[in-house]
Amino acid sequence: MLLDGYDVAEVAQALKASRTTVYQWQAIVESQGLDGLKRQGQSGRASKLDERQIEQLKAILKAGAVAYGFPNEQWTGKRVRKVILETFQVEYNATYLCRWLRQLGYSPQLPQTQSKKRSQAAVDHWKRHVWPHIKKVA
């Protein structure tokens, strides 16, 4: 659009980009040509697991946390980290694994915690008798 004579503000508005970004694109085109705007590929460190290992990990996750030996079906970052360490002898940060699992299509899960002093009878009583009274007064 810039090469066709559109001004920076028009390009920014049409592409829903900031003017600063359009100015950066303009500088890249002037110095490197249109090829300078092509994707450069993925940057960063290569994965510590190969494709076969990733498929094996997916199979373990699909089988479930209980099948692996955990007390419930929640896959947390720490649990996945433990599985990877035990299965592939590779260490990952649990926080990174949460992001990585989202990229694989898994949703983040956190363990549910309840007080050991919790009484379900007391909770039910509060919901049935106390809460309606509070709700009426409010």
Image: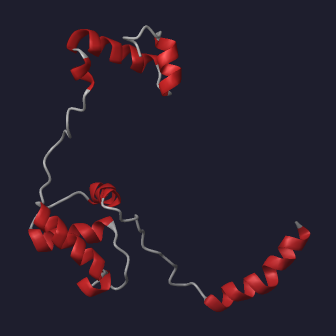
Q: Nearer the viewer, residue 52 or 75?
A: 52
107 left or right of 125 in image: left
Q: Residue at x 27, y 82 (%)?
A: 63
Give the image quarter of residue 90.
bottom left
Q: Nearer the viewer, residue 76 or 52?
A: 52
* Colour convention: secondary structure
Residue 39 in the image: above or below residue 130: above
Q: Residue at x 10, y 69 (%)?
A: 88
Can you give x and y, in whole percent of width and height, for residue 66 in the image? 31, 85
Q: Residue at x 47, y 18 (%)?
A: 11
Quarter of the image that includes the N terminus: top left
Give the image quarter of residue 38.
top left
> Most extreme residue toward the front, as rendered?
4
Can you give x and y, in whole percent of width and height, for residue 33 in the image? 23, 14
Residue 36 in the image: above or below residue 81: above
Can you give x and y, in whole percent of width and height, for residue 69 in the image? 25, 86
Quarter of the image that includes the C terminus: bottom right
Q: Nearer the viewer, residue 111 or 25?
A: 25
Q: Nearer the viewer, residue 87 or 94?
A: 87
Can you give x and y, in whole percent of width and height, for residue 62 in the image? 29, 77
Q: Residue at x 10, y 60 (%)?
A: 50
13 left or right of 87 in image: right
